[in-house]
Image (tube, helix red, strand yellow):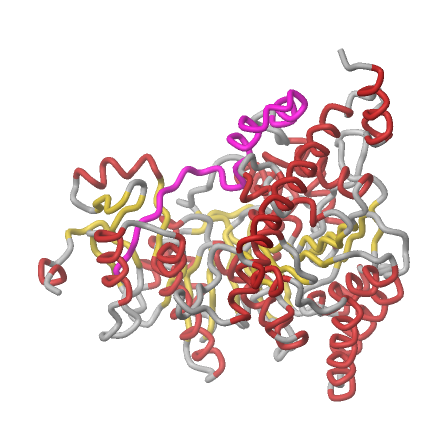
C-alpha cells in the first residue's frame, strides 16, 4: 500500500482520466504506461548519444517548421491552379479549398471522402498542415497500407517539400548507397526513424499500429512523438477487421487524451463511427460537404454486374479480348495463373506476389509503357494492383470480391478520364477461390448487395457505408481477445497477438536479375553465407524476396525447392518464370554455375 507521500505524488501526476472507475480505465492505463515507457526509452537513448556522439545530437536538431512546409505547399498549389484548367481541375480546386477552410475546426476525428482522381493526397496534406498550424501540432504522420502507394505518395511530397523534409519509414526504403559513409541526409533519416522526430513522416499502417502494440523498446521509442500530431490514415477501409476493436480503442484514446487529430481518407469510407451495434469512433466529421456530388461529377466508368451468373475462365478471357487494353483482377494467385492459361496470349502480363518486388516494378513499367503507346496490353493480376497503383485501362474485369476491393479495381479504369466512359465488368468465377476470414465474408455481403433487384449504385458512397456496417456486424473485431490482454497489462501477450498480417509467412530470396549483368542477389547471398544477416543486407534484399506460407516450407525443402541460408531465411532453388514468377519445377543445373 503506498505511503501518504506516495499517494500525494500519484494524485499530483496521474492524469484525471486514469482515476475514475469506468470499465475502460484499464485500457487507458495500458496506453498511458506505454507512452511513458516511450518517453523513458527515447530519453535514455538521446542522453547516451549526447554524451558519446554529440555530433549526432546536432544533426537531429535540423528541422523545418510546419509553417515553412505549409508555405511550400501553398506556393506549389498556386502554380498548379494557375496552369490547370477543365472541370476535373475545378473539382480538385473545390476539394482543396474545403480542406483549407475545415482546418480550423476543433481537433478530433475527420473523414475525407474523395473519389479517385479528386486530389486527396494534396488536399489531405493541406488540411493537416493548416490544422497543425492553427492548433500547434508537432508533426504530420501519413500512414498508408501498401508500400507501392507509399513510394508514389512520398514522391509527390518530395516534389512539393523537398527530399530533406520527408521522412519515409518502412521496410522497403532503400538503404544508403554507401553504408560505410552515409550522406548527412541519409544519416538524419536513419536517426529520425528511430523516434519519429520529424515534421512529416510517411509510413505504413503496419509500422504505425504494430508499434502502438509492441513490447520492444526499439518499436516503442517513437510512440510519445505520436502525441500532439495529425495522423492521416490513407485507404482507411483496409484496416484489418480482425483487429478493428483494439485499433479503434487506441485511436479514440489518442484523440481524446493525447492531442491527436485523425483524418480517415478513402473513396470507400468505412462505417467506423460509434453506433448501437458497434463500438467505434466518436464524433467523426466529414471535411467535404456533400461528397456524393463529386462522385457523380468524377464518374469515369460504367459498371456491368453479372452477380447472378457463373463465368468460366475461358469466358473471362473472351471478355478481355473485347478491348486492346484490358486488366482482370482475381482473388487468388491460383486464379491468376488459371486465367493466364485461358487467355493464352504470349504477350500477356501477370502481377501477383508470386513475383518478387523488383520483378513487379519491371512489369508495371512495361504495362505503363504499353498503355502510353496505345499498344495491346492484357494484364492478369491479384489485389496487388488495386489500391493506388497508377494504371489506366479502358476495360477492367473484377472477380466478385469485397465491395471496397471492387471499387479500388475500378479506379484503374479510365483513371485519367481520357474516355467518355470506361467499362468495369464484375463477374462471378465458376472455379474461383477465396481467401478465408473477413475477405470471404465481405465477398458474400457484396454479392448479396449487387445481386439484389434494387440495382445497387456503385457510385454512391452510402452503399459502402451499408456494406461496412454489415461486414462489421458479421465479423469478430477482436479475434484474439487483445483487449483482455491490454486490460491485464500483459504487454508481451499483446505484442504476440497483434499481427496486422494474419498469415504466417517466411521470406524466400529469389535470384532475380533485371539485366544479364545483374549479380546483386548472388553477391548478397554470398555475403550472408560468410558474414550472416544484418539490417543493411535485409534492406538490400527486399526487392528480391517472396513471402511463402510457413506451412509449405518443410515440404519445399524436402523437394529441393528451397534451402535455409540463415535462420528463418531461405533461398529459392525452384524455377522462376519471366511471366509467372515462382514455379515449382527443378532448377536448371546450368543456373548453379556462377
Q: Position of residue 40 (x, y in %)?
A: 65, 40
At horizontal 71% and vertical 63% (from top left) the residue drawn is: 115
Left or right relative to 336: residue 442: right
Q: Position of residue 69 (x, y in %)?
A: 74, 71
Q: Is residue 301 visible?
A: yes
Residue 167 covered by magenta stretch: no
Q: Quadrant of residue 579?
A: bottom left
- 138 relative to 366, above or below: above
Q: Quadrant of residue 136?
A: bottom right
Q: Is residue 209 visible?
A: no
Q: Which residues are magenta?
A: 482-511
For the residue pair 363 and 71, the one nearer the viewer reads as 71
- 6 relative to 256, above or below: above
For the residue pair 340 and 261, the one nearer the viewer reads as 261
Q: Residue furthest front?
A: 51
Total marks placed: 0
The quarter of the rendered structure image containing the N terminus is top right
At horizontal 23% and vertical 41% (from top left) the residue drawn is: 556
Q: Position of residue 88 (x, y in %)?
A: 74, 77
Q: Quadrant of residue 143?
A: bottom right
Q: Residue furthest top?
A: 1
For the residue pair 191 and 27, the one nearer the viewer reads as 191
Q: Residue furthest bottom?
A: 83
At horizontal 20% and vertical 47% (from top left) the residue drawn is: 561
- 510 relative to 215, above or below: below
Amino acid at each position: 500500500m503506498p505511503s501518504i507521500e506516495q499517494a500525494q505524488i500519484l494524485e499530483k501526476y496521474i492524469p484525471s482520466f486514469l482515476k475514475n472507475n469506468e470499465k475502460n480505465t484499464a485500457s487507458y492505463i495500458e496506453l498511458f504506461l506505454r507512452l511513458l515507457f516511450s518517453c523513458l526509452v527515447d530519453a535514455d537513448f538521446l542522453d547516451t548519444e549526447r554524451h558519446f556522439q554529440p555530433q549526432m545530437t546536432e544533426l537531429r536538431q535540423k528541422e523545418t517548421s510546419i509553417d515553412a512546409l505549409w508555405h511550400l505547399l501553398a506556393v506549389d498549389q498556386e502554380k498548379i491552379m494557375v496552369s490547370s484548367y477543365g472541370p476535373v481541375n475545378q473539382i480538385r480546386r473545390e476539394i482543396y479549398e474545403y480542406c483549407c477552410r475545415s482546418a480550423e475546426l476543433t481537433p478530433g476525428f475527420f473523414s475525407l471522402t474523395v473519389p479517385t482522381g479528386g486530389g486527396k493526397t494534396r488536399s489531405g496534406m493541406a488540411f493537416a498542415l493548416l490544422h497543425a498550424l492553427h492548433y500547434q501540432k508537432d508533426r504530420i504522420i501519413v500512414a498508408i497500407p501498401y508500400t507501392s502507394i507509399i513510394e508514389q505518395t512520398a514522391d509527390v511530397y518530395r516534389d512539393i517539400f523537398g527530399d530533406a523534409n520527408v521522412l519515409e519509414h518502412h521496410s522497403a526504403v532503400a538503404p544508403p548507397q554507401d553504408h560505410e559513409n552515409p550522406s548527412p541526409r541519409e544519416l538524419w533519416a536513419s536517426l529520425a526513424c528511430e523516434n519519429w522526430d520529424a515534421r512529416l513522416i510517411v509510413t505504413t499502417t503496419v509500422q504505425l499500429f504494430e508499434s502502438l502494440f509492441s513490447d520492444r523498446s526499439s518499436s516503442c521509442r517513437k510512440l510519445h512523438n505520436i502525441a500532439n500530431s495529425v495522423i492521416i490514415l490513407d485507404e482507411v477501409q483496409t484496416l484489418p477487421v480482425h483487429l478493428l476493436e483494439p485499433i479503434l480503442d487506441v485511436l479514440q484514446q489518442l484523440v481524446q487524451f493525447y492531442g491527436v487529430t485523425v483524418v480517415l481518407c478513402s473513396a470507400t469510407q468505412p462505417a467506423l463511427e460509434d453506433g448501437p451495434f458497434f463500438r467505434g469512433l466518436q464524433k467523426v466529421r466529414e471535411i467535404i460537404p456533400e461528397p456524393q456530388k463529386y462522385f457523380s461529377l468524377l464518374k469515369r466508368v460504367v459498371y456491368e454486374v453479372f452477380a447472378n451468373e457463373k463465368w468460366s475462365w475461358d469466358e473471362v478471357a473472351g471478355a478481355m479480348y473485347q478491348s486492346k487494353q484490358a486488366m482482370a483482377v482475381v482473388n487468388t494467385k491460383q486464379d491468376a495463373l488459371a486465367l493466364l492459361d485461358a487467355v493464352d496470349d504470349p504477350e500477356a502480363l501477370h502481377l501477383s506476389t508470386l513475383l518478387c518486388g523488383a520483378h513487379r516494378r519491371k512489369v508495371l513499367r512495361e504495362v505503363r509503357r504499353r498503355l502510353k503507346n496505345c499498344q495491346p496490353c492484357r494484364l492478369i493480376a491479384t489485389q496487388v494492383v488495386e489500391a493506388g497503383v497508377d494504371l489506366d485501362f479502358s476495360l477492367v474485369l473484377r472477380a466478385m470480391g469485397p465491395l471496397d476491393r471492387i471499387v479500388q479495381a475500378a479506379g484503374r479504369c479510365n483513371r485519367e478520364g481520357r474516355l467518355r466512359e470506361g467499362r468495369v465488368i464484375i463477374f462471378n468465377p465458376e472455379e474461383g477461390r477465396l481467401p478465408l476470414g473477413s475477405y470471404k465474408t465481405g465477398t458474400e455481403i457484396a454479392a448479396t448487395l449487387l445481386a439484389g433487384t434494387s440495382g445497387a449504385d456503385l457510385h454512391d458512397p452510402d452503399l459502402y457505408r451499408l456494406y461496412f456496417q454489415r461486414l462489421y456486424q458479421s465479423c469478430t473485431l477482436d479475434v484474439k481477445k487483445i483487449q483482455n490482454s491490454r486490460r491485464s497489462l500483459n504487454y508481451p501477450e499483446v505484442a504476440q497477438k497483434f499481427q496486422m498480417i494474419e498469415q504466417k509467412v517466411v521470406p524466400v530470396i529469389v535470384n532475380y536479375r533485371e539485366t544479364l549483368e545483374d549479380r546483386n542477389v548472388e553477391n548478397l547471398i554470398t555475403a550472408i553465407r560468410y558474414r550472416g544477416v544484418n539490417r543493411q543486407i535485409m534492406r538490400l534484399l527486399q526487392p528480391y524476396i517472396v513471402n511463402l506460407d510457413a506451412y509449405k516450407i518443410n515440404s519445399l525443402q524436402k523437394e529441393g525447392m528451397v534451402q535455409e541460408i540463415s535462420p528463418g531465411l531461405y533461398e529459392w532453388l525452384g524455377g522462376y518464370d519471366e511471366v509467372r514468377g515462382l514455379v515449382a519445377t527443378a532448377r536448371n543445373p546450368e543456373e548453379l554455375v556462377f
